[in-house]
């Protein structure tokens, strides 16, 4: 009876190890970024597990401990401290990689292999950093919570920059075609986006303003969201601004979406949250969607990291081809060759890296901080327990802290868009192209 299950367990373990070895060994230059996304997804999953399921498991283990060695903290520790510790270990992992890969410009740099290879070592280093994070005092982790708040705002700022980069590139691409059908397409998309904005604002008013006398907070949120949309459109259509209706409409629909998520993040016991009963019944599904959204968001940010921020991208090829001082190779090239046979074959020039490795890993470090804030309700108390009862552990991104951050994100994106339009007027001597 014991031999069969033991052999089966050994075989399953061997197969699992062989599968992991094959997967890790198959990671190459083209799949390295996807591997980092998977690693970040594992950290999100681990944060969720330690937050909602670690305490019951440890409590059960405590009942089986005759020596009373196991001491299980209260649920508040797991709701905040445990999540922050996973985030701390993950952030340190990506920060160390960002420092090690600082200023890598050419693929011939020996550090280029550090970014694309050595995955077994990276996995071990990540696990060791997680262990270290669970050994540091609570005061250190609480201080890291404040760092997470600042890092989360930086992450949201990068997201806004990527959104603006996308909409401006979209507008320039269609406008550069200089054909009537493309101008009509821009107009149709813009009108459609505004129609969606108006429809969504009406639906939000029905759901989140059931009583105009007691729901003044939600009324103000919707009023200022409408005011923001009008302001963005007015600035874009001003004759002194080189604006367009298409970017304004896309940014408007994004700001309306952020307002909708802010209203959905209101506490479940808030009387003006008309979706609270439905959100409570779908809390586990919403958790999965929120985690998936965060994962897709950081993946898109990391992939576009090298091209979205010029200051943090590798130097342009022209800058590298024209150094300030002549090199030995330049001096030799200026001399006439003695004969064709004596001219040595020129080595192929090294290729430049496609994106900034340091900024790539910095994005993931900021995303780890941002995900910790989502899972802890931005550290303003156990907002995830707003529903009460057994549903509390499944809620994510719920509470007035989340509402405030999303409203700041909404207005920050709008103001950043306005700045992108008026900055060339305020500073005409600077090149904003």
Image: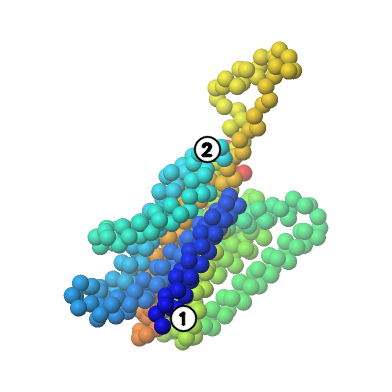
Answer with the quarter of the image where residue 273 lies: bottom left
Q: Position of residue 15 (x, y in %)?
A: 51, 67
Residue 54 screen position, x and y as percent = 34, 74
Looking at the rendered structure, the secondary structure element under dot 2 is loop
Residue at 73% across, 66% down: 188
Query: As displayed, is residue 377 above or below residue 276?
Result: above
Q: Position of residue 428 (x, y in %)?
A: 58, 40
Q: Is residue 211 above or below residue 333?
A: below
Q: Is residue 426 visible?
A: no
The crowding category of the residue bearing disc 2, from other C-alpha atoms within 10 Å (few below 14, some 14 to 19, many at least 20), is some
**Residue, far right:** 180
User: To which residue does mark 2 refer?
Assistant: 109
Q: Residue 49 appears at what percent x and percent y?
A: 40, 72
Of marks 1 and 2, which one's residue comes earlier in the chain? 2
Picture residue at 25% right of the left edge, 62% below the top: 138
Q: Is residue 63 left or right of residue 327?
A: left
Tag 1's secondary structure?
A: helix
- Which residue occupies the foreground of this view, 122 or 154? 122
Nearer to the camera, 165 or 427: 165
> Quick one: which residue is furthest to the left in this view?
67
- For the N terminus, the image quarter is bottom left
Image side of residue 73 versus residue 156, left or right = left
User: Are the residues tagged 1 and 2 within 8 Å (C-beta)?
Assistant: no
Q: Quadrant of the C terminus?
A: top right
Q: Nearer the viewer, residue 81 or 311?
A: 81
Residue under numbered circle 1: 283
Q: Nearer the viewer, mark 1 or mark 2?
A: 2
Instruction: Let me know if residue 335 appears in the view.
Output: yes
């Amino acid at each position: 009876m014991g031999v069969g299950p033991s052999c089966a367990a050994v075989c399953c373990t061997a197969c699992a190890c062989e599968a992991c070895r094959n997967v890790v060994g198959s990671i190459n230059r083209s799949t390295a970024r996807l591997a980092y996304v998977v690693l970040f997804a594992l950290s999100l999953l681990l944060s969720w597990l330690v937050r909602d399921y670690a305490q019951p498991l440890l409590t059960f283990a405590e009942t089986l401990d005759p020596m009373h060695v196991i001491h299980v903290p209260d649920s508040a520790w797991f709701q905040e401290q445990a999540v922050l510790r996973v985030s701390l270990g993950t952030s340190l992992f990506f920060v160390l990689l960002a420092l090690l890969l600082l200023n890598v410009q050419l693929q011939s740099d020996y550090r280029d292999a550090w970014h694309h290879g050595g995955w077994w070592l990276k996995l071990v280093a990540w696990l060791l950093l997680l262990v270290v994070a669970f050994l540091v005092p609570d005061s250190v982790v609480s201080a890291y919570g404040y760092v997470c708040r600042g890092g989360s705002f930086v992450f949201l700022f990068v997201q806004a920059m990527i959104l603006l980069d996308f909409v401006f590139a979209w507008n320039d691409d269609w406008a550069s075609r200089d054909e009537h059908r493309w101008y009509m397409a821009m107009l149709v998309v813009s009108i459609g986006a505004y129609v969606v904005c108006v429809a969504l604002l009406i639906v939000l008013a029905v759901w989140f303003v059931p009583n105009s006398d007691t729901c003044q907070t939600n009324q103000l949120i919707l009023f200022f969201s409408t005011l923001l949309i009008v302001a963005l459109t007015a600035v874009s259509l001003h004759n002194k601004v080189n604006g367009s209706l298409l970017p304004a409409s896309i940014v408007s629909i994004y700001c309306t979406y952020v307002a909708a998520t802010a209203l959905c993040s209101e506490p479940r016991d808030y009387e003006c949250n008309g979706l609270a009963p439905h959100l409570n019944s779908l809390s586990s599904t919403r958790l999965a969607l929120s985690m998936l959204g965060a994962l897709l968001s950081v993946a898109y940010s990391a992939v576009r990291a090298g091209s979205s921020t010029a200051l943090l991208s590798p130097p342009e090829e022209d800058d590298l081809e024209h150094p300030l001082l002549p090199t030995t190779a330049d001096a030799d090239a200026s001399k006439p060759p003695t004969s064709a046979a004596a001219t040595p074959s020129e080595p192929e020039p090294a290729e430049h890296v496609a994106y900034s490795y340091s900024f790539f890993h910095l994005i993931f470090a900021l995303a780890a901080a941002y995900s910790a804030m989502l899972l802890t309700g931005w550290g303003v108390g156990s907002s995830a327990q707003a529903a009460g009862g057994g549903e509390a552990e499944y809620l994510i991104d719920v509470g007035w802290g989340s509402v405030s951050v999303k409203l700041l994100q909404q207005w920050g994106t709008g103001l950043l868009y306005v700045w992108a339009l008026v900055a060339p007027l305020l500073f005409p001597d600077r090149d904003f192209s």
